[in-house]
Image (cartoon, helix red, strand yellow):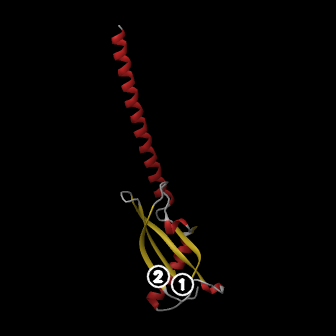
Amino acid sequence: MNNKIKLIDDQILKLRQKTNALINQRNEELEKIAIKKKIWEEYIGKTYAYRNNCFSCPENKSDYWDVYYKIISYDEDKKRYRYFSFQKDSHGDVTILLKSVYSNNDGTPGADISVTTRISEEEFEEAENKILAEFVFGTFISS
C-alpha cells in the first residue's frame, strides 16, 4: 500500500509541476498580448515633439526649435519602433529622417522618442505642411 501511495503522490507532484509550468507559460503569453495591445493602441500613429532643441550656447528664443516625430510601425521580432521625424533648425537647415529605435522592456519606445512630449495630430500636420511647403513651393516659412 505504501508503494502505491508513493507512486500516486509522485504522479500528483509531476502533474502539479506541469500545471504550474503551463500556468506560467499562459501568463507570459498574456503579458506579451497586453504589451502588443498597448503598443498598437498607445504608440502606432501617434505624434510627438521634442521641445526646445538647440545647438550649444543658445542666446535667443530663435536659437531653439522643435523636432517632430510620428511612430509608423513596430517590428515585434526586432523589438523596434519605426518612426518618421523632421526638424528645421535655427540655421534653417531641414532634416527629415525615417529611423528606428528599440523599445523598452515594457513596450514603450526608447531613446529618441522617450524624451518627447505627445502632441496632437493637428500640430504635427501643421509643422509638416510648413516643411513640405518649403520643398514644393521653395518658400521659407519662419517658425
Q: Position of residue 83 (x, y in %)?
A: 44, 69
The C terminus, quarter of image? bottom right
The answer to which quarter of the image holds residue 6 is top left
In the picture, measured across the screen, residue 50 lies left or right of residue 11, that is: right
Residue 46 image label: none
- Mark 1 falls on what kind of element? loop
Q: Residue at x 56, y 73 (%)?
A: 50
Rounded to the nearest angstrom, the CA distance separating label 2 from label 1 is 8 Å
Residue for badge 2: 95
Q: Position of residue 23 (x, y in %)?
A: 42, 35
In this rendering, the count of numbered labels is 2
The answer to which quarter of the image holds residue 29 is top left
Q: Residue at x 40, y 59 (%)?
A: 79
Residue for badge 1: 89
Q: Residue at x 46, y 60 (%)?
A: 103
- Number of other residues with Cα within 10 Å of mark 1, as a class: few under 14, some 14 to 19, many 20 or more: some
Q: Position of residue 127 (x, y in %)?
A: 54, 79
The N terminus, quarter of image? top left
- Number of other residues with Cα within 10 Å of mark 2, as a class: few under 14, some 14 to 19, many 20 or more: few
Q: Is residue 70 above or below residue 40?
A: below
| Residue closer to the observer: 24 or 73 | 24
- Mark 2 falls on what kind of element? strand
Disc with the residue nearer the chain's start (2 vs 1): 1
Residue type of the residue flagged with mark 1 = Asp
| Residue closer to the observer: 83 or 1 | 1
Tell me, yes or no, whether the two marked residues, 2 and 1, touch with CB atoms within 8 Å: yes
Given the current orientation, which residue lies at the most extreme top position?
1
Q: Position of residue 105 (x, y in %)?
A: 47, 55
